[in-house]
Amino acid sequence: MNYVSYVTGEEYYKNYCKPFINSIYSNDLDGNKLFLYVSNISKETILETTEKFGDFVKFLSIPDFFGNEFWSKMAMQSYCFAHFLENISSSEDVNCLIDCDTIILKKIYPHIENINFDIALTVYEKPHSTPYGDVSLFPNGKNRFNAGVIFTKGKKSLSFFYELAGRLIFYTATRHNYVYPHAELLGPQQSTIGLMLFGKELELSFDNNLKYAGLSFSFLPCSEFNETESIGVISDKVKILHLKGGWRKLIPNPDWESVKNTPRRKEWSENIYQEWEKYRW
């Protein structure tokens, strides 16, 4: 299986991407590879990573024409995924397209190899209450999905990611930003995927028979494949822990007290901080 991710900037690379790399290497190597699209990462940092992990990590450059707007960065991510599917992935590959502020806790492929899909998204199975509110925000009671972990099989989904990148570029160019039908999906990429799959009326249906543009979709539980809230006890069934690094601005070489008092969210639970700390290097 291929892991495919992207990262911009040295601080984010140090605080999140380095533990991410180490967690895959430690817990899900088995011939897997990590393809990492990078921007504003020094040659010294790349060399340091290569010396530690060898050819397990393949570095690729992110085109610099996307700019720094938030929506542009989301378009860049989708473009990188499309570039990978078109130029690197084979028709037999299984790929995990993933944010780098994650920790891989267990082997992934054995849990998805017998599931039929071209694209698999991760969804909340039930209303998910947190200290900062309820993330099941839909008036029709449907639950959100999270685009931080997406699985693909083969190359059929190539056009989907080019369409996704194109729509995000359009939203940026027209300053569409957060004036769109799916604001409650809490993120440009998620909102755009929601619009593509479910239409403007937000008729969400996480049905494993869903088809879009000839593609077959499956839906996997966030509680196993994309635990997104980074709070509470880590369940034994969690395979991917999503730290939501952009929401918790860690200072370099943080200690528990500095993490506990970060802005925007109340705290990381201490056991999740310790899990993250385990893979730092």
Image (cartoon, rainbow, N blue to C red):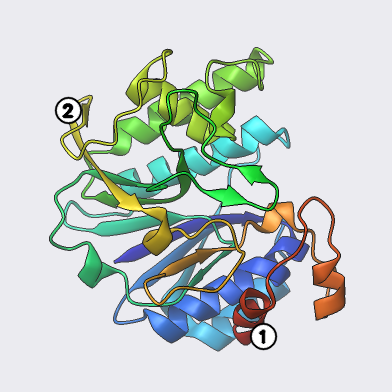
Identify the secondary structure beneath mark 2: loop
Q: Position of residue 202 (x, y in %)?
A: 41, 20
Q: Which residue is mark 1?
A: 281
| Residue 281 picture quarter | bottom right
User: In the rendered structure, which amino acid carries the disc numbered 2?
Assistant: Gly
Q: Residue at x 25, y 58 (%)?
A: 94
Q: Position of residue 200 (x, y in %)?
A: 43, 13
Q: CA distance from mark 1 to mark 2?
A: 43 Å
Q: Name the residue: 67% across, 59% down.
A: 245
As helix, strand or loop, the secondary structure at mark 1 comes to loop
Residue positioned 33% across, 76% down in the render: 107
Three-letter code for the amino acid on which mark 1 is drawn: Trp
Q: Is residue 65 visible?
A: no
**Residue 169 rendering spot, x and y as whole percentages:** 57, 24
Residue 121: numbered disc: none
Residue 188 position (above or below residue 94) = above
Residue found at x 68% / y 71%:
269
Callout 2 environment at 10 Å: few (<14), some (14 to 19), or many (20+)?
Answer: few
Q: Earlier in the sequence, mark 1 or mark 2?
A: 2
Q: Position of residue 164 (x, y in %)?
A: 44, 29
Instruction: Examine the image and state in which quarter residue 265 appears.
Output: bottom right
On screen, residue 224 versus residue 112, left or right, reads right
Task: Report whether residue 59 is seen.
Answer: yes
Q: How many marks?
A: 2
Disc sitting over residue 214 in the figure:
2
Is 175 left or right of 77, judged from the image as shown? Answer: right
Q: Quadrant for the N terminus, please.
A: bottom left
User: Quick one: 96 or 137, which is closer to the camera?
Assistant: 137
Q: Please determine whether, in this image, residue 162 is positioned above or below residue 259.
A: above
Q: Is residue 277 above or below residue 125?
A: below
Please state if 194 lies on the left or on the right of 71 as rendered: left
> Where is residue 2, by image quadrant?
bottom left
